[in-house]
Amino acid sequence: MHQECFRPCGPAELELVRQSGFRRWPPRLLGQPFFYPVTNEEYAREITVKWNVPADGAGYVTRFFVRREFMDRYAVQTVGGEQHTEWWIPAEDLDEMNDHLVGLIEVIGSY
């Protein structure tokens, strides 16, 4: 069984995803201790429009699937309103999460 995940990202991060063949998320930068996939498209779109577009001039909403056995290791965190839910994947676990991706990372929205 698979867990559907969403992630807002800017052009630089999307380019790194593209370079992986849409198969892997890039390592976190120094000072980024977590990778934050979100649980719903609405929240990903909100972050993209409010943060990525003003900061980078463009933003993208992506969707990807991860084997549930991996994602179940992490609690869903609510960080604002009811729809503001996400996982906090430690940076050191990102390679393992990438190994549990099912299919390709897809862009489902461009802003």
Image (spheres, rainbow, N blue to C red):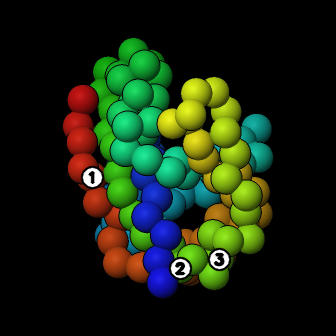
Q: Which label's residue is closer to the chain start, 3 or 1?
A: 3
Residue 75 in view in this figure:
yes
Q: Is residue 2 above or below residue 77?
A: below
Tell which of 21 and 110 is nearer to you. Answer: 110
Residue furthest to the top in view is 54
Residue carrying label 2: 67
Disc 2 vs disc 1: which is toward the camera? 2
Residue at x 51% of width, y 36% of height: 83
Residue at x 65% of width, y 65% of height: 94
Mark 2 vs mark 1, CA separation in Å: 19 Å
Q: Is residue 94 above or below residue 84?
A: below
Residue 24 position, x and y percent, is 47, 67
Q: Is residue 49 above or below residue 63?
A: above
Disc 3 vs disc 1: which is toward the camera? 3
Badge 1 crowding class, 10 Å Cα cut-off, few under 14, some 14 to 19, many 20 or more, is some
Residue at x 73% of width, y 58% of height: 75
Residue carrying label 1: 107
Q: Are marks 3 and 1 in contact (CB under 8 Å)?
A: no
Residue 68 position, x and y percent, is 57, 77
SS for callout 1 = strand
